[in-house]
Image (tube, rainbow, N blue to C red):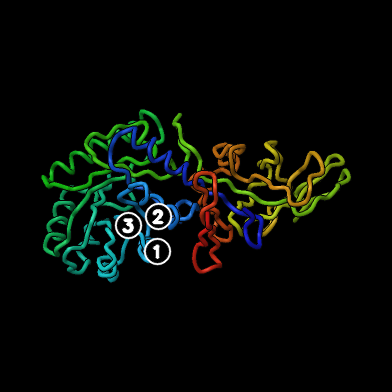
């Protein structure tokens, strides 16, 4: 399929999504809460939510109320847990849209208005020292206040700080504390969850009946798991230049050719979410790695070539030949940061059974469904 206007686009493989959901479910046989915050880590939250519903996923999680309501406005019916801070004045709106909100502190529930029937998951802080109720006494008080305001306390959860590290003492301590705090209140919660992507694979949580899957949903794990990456990101070669030894490339002349060589300009830049630190990292052409040279520009990047390629040749920015973990190390970050930075200026093409089924360009009002 040829995308409209621009040959830079991301492919998102919905069969890979199905595969990952099955693999992760087979690890523990618990309810999966699909974390699709930050536009589904850059993959497109609405389209992924639609397909997750189609394959039987019952709950997803986002970070903000506007993310949650956007999903409702696009027809998503499954349970939506908002894990972030929802302001007191917005709780009625959350209730009207059937959004599950998070009780993040005693102060939060004290200031919350009475909204009878508001669906709530209680968050415990067992070691992250971010959002969450930390003290048992505060938890007891917060639950009592929630009862007086008519809240429906459906779930309780915590978040591990180091679950991507095997046999981590902190994870064990957090899990133990979480169990103790939940058992102390002597309540029945429909959903109890603490495992994130790392813990799903390497840390059993028999006390819980659900797990939250984030990065692993999109095909990446620190462990040897049979996951399939969803995204391939492509950009075309727009121009090729022959450099003589000593010539420079791009802003600030940050790359100088140490011999006669070829460079190609490709149609993607930091305005699309490509970090300026990609310089020195690699893309792939026909399966062969090529180095980014010179500074990443707002709309363009420059790569060193081994030969003259036809103009329009597609470059693999992300995909099967690019080691995302090595790329993240080069960038001084983690894979979690790479994907959400890929913004909506990049069109998404959704693939199912080897065929494109939808084309999404944020500059158009709604996803274009493709007749099959």
**Coordinates of residue 128 in the picture (x, y in percent):** 34, 45
> Which residue in the structure is indicated by mark 1?
74
Question: What residue appears at the point 40 percent right and 54 percent down from the top-left corner?
Answer: 49
Question: What residue appears at the point 76 percent right and 43 percent down from the top-left corner?
Answer: 304
> Which residue in the structure is indicated by mark 2?
50
Q: Earlier in the sequence, mark 2 or mark 3?
A: 2
- Asked if residue 214 shows in the view, the reply is yes
Q: CA distance from mark 2 to mark 3?
A: 18 Å
The answer to whether marks 1 and 2 mark residues whose Cβ atoms lie closer than 8 Å is: yes
- The tag on residue 12 is none
Vertical side of 169 occupied by 46: above or below: below
Q: In the orientation shown, which residue stands out farthest toward the bottom?
A: 89
**Coordinates of residue 287 in the picture (x, y in percent):** 67, 36
Quadrant position of residue 181: top left
Q: CA distance from mark 1 to mark 3?
A: 17 Å
Q: Earlier in the sequence, mark 1 or mark 3?
A: 1
Frontmost of labels 1 and 3 is: 1
Front-most of residues 275 and 356: 356
């Amino acid at each position: 399929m040829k995308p409209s206007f621009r040959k830079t686009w991301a492919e998102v493989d919905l069969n890979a999504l199905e595969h990952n959901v099955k693999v992760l479910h087979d690890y523990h046989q618990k309810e999966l809460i699909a974390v699709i915050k930050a536009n589904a880590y850059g993959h497109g939250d609405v389209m992924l939510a639609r397909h997750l519903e189609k394959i039987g996923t019952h709950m997803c999680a986002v970070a903000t109320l506007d993310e949650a309501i956007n999903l409702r406005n696009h027809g998503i019916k499954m349970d939506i847990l908002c894990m972030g801070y929802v302001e007191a004045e917005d709780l009625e709106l959350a209730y009207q849209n059937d959004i599950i909100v998070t009780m993040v502190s005693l102060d939060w529930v004290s200031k919350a208005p009475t909204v009878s029937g508001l669906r709530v998951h209680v968050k415990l802080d067992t070691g992250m020292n971010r959002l969450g109720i930390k003290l048992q006494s505060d938890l007891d008080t917060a639950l009592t206040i929630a009862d007086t305001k008519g809240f429906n306390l459906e779930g309780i959860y915590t978040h591990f700080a180091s679950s991507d590290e095997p046999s981590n003492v902190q994870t064990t301590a957090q899990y133990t504390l979480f169990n103790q705090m939940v058992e102390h209140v002597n309540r029945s919660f429909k959903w109890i969850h603490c495992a994130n992507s790392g813990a799903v694979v390497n840390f059993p949580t028999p006390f819980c009946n659900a797990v939250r899957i984030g990065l692993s949903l999109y095909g990446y794990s620190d462990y040897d798991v049979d996951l399939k990456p969803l995204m391939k990101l492509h950009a075309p070669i727009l121009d090729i230049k022959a450099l003589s030894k000593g010539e420079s490339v791009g802003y600030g002349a940050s790359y100088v050719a140490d011999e006669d060589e070829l460079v190609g300009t490709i149609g993607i830049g930091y305005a699309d979410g490509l970090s300026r630190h990609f310089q020195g990292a690699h893309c792939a052409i026909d399966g062969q790695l090529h180095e980014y040279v010179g500074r990443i520009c707002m709309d363009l990047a420059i790569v060193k070539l081994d030969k003259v390629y036809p103009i329009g040749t597609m470059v693999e920015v992300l995909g099967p030949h690019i080691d995302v973990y090595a790329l993240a190390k080069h960038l001084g970050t983690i894979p979690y940061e790479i994907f959400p930075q890929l913004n909506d200026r990049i069109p998404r093409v959704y693939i199912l059974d080897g065929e494109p089924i939808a084309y999404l360009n944020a500059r158009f009002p709604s996803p274009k469904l493709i007749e099959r």
